[in-house]
Amino acid sequence: MFGAVLVLGLAGWITYEGDRSHYVTRQNIPREQPIPFSHAHHVGGEGFDCRYCHTSVETSSFAGIPPTETCMNCHSQIWRTSPILEPVRASYRTGQSIRWTRVHDLPDFVYFNHSIHVAKGVGCESCHGRVDRMPLMWEEASLRMEWCLNCHRHPEQYVRPRESITAMGYVPAGNQEEIGRRLMQEYHIQDARVLTSCSTCHR
C-alpha cells in the first residue's frame, strides 16, 4: 500500500513538472522561420520601434504580422540581391504571404487583446522578453494561466508609462510599486478582483 502511494505521488510529481517543462511550454526554444529574421539586428541594432512592423498593436486585439511591403521599404534599397532575402522578394513579386511560424499562440478558449494591454501600460518586453537580444524569436514566458494571473493580481509591479511601452530594458524612474499604483489610477486599471475574474479572459 505504501509503495502504491509512493508510485502515485511520484507519477503526479513527474506529470506536474513535465507539464511545466520547456519541452511542453516551448519556452526559450528559437523557432525556425522561412527567413532568419533577427529582432536583435532590427530592434537592438537598428533601433526599430515595435510598432513600425506590428502596426495594429495599439488598436487591435492582434499585434499583426507585417506585410511584405514593410520589409521592402528598406530591402528594395539595401541587401537587394541577398539570397537569404529571396523569399521576401518572391512574396513581393507574387503577392503570396510569407508563411511565418507562429511563436506566441494562446489556446482558443483564452481572450487576449493587445490594444487593451498597451493602453494600460503593459510593455512589450513584459510578455515577449528582450526581443532586442533575440537573433531568432522564442517564447520568453510560459503564457500559462498562472503566469498571466501573477500580473493580473499585482499590476502595480508591471505597468509603465505609455511612452515607454516599446522600450527594451525599461528601468522605472523611482519605486516601481509607487509608480505602478499611480498609473493604475491614471489609466483606470481595475482592481485584482475584476482582473482575476474568470470572465475577464474566458468569454
Image (cartoon, helix red, strand yellow):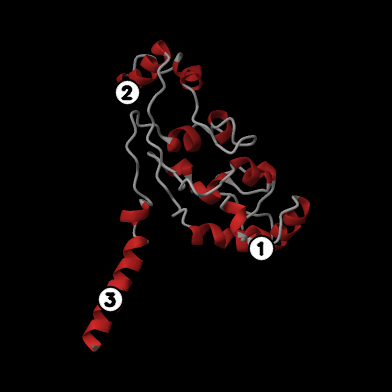
For the point 41% across and 22% down, the residue is 97
Q: Is residue 78 visible from the viewing direction of this image?
A: yes
Q: Earlier in the sequence, mark 3 or mark 2?
A: 3
Query: Where on the picture, by quarter, is residue 58?
Result: top right
Secondary structure state at the residue bearing disc 2:
helix
The residue under label 2 is 84
Residue 25 in the figure: left or right of residue 155: left
Residue 80 coordinates in the image, percent (x, y): 39, 14
The residue under label 1 is 192
Q: Residue 10 carries which label?
A: 3
Residue 102 in the figure: left or right of residue 193: left
Q: Residue 147 carries which label?
A: none
> Marks 3/2: CA distance?
49 Å
Secondary structure state at the residue bearing disc 1:
helix
Mark 1 vs 3: CB contact within 8 A: no
Query: Where on the picture, by quarter, is residue 119?
Result: top right
Q: Which of marks 2 and 1 is nearer the N terminus?
A: 2
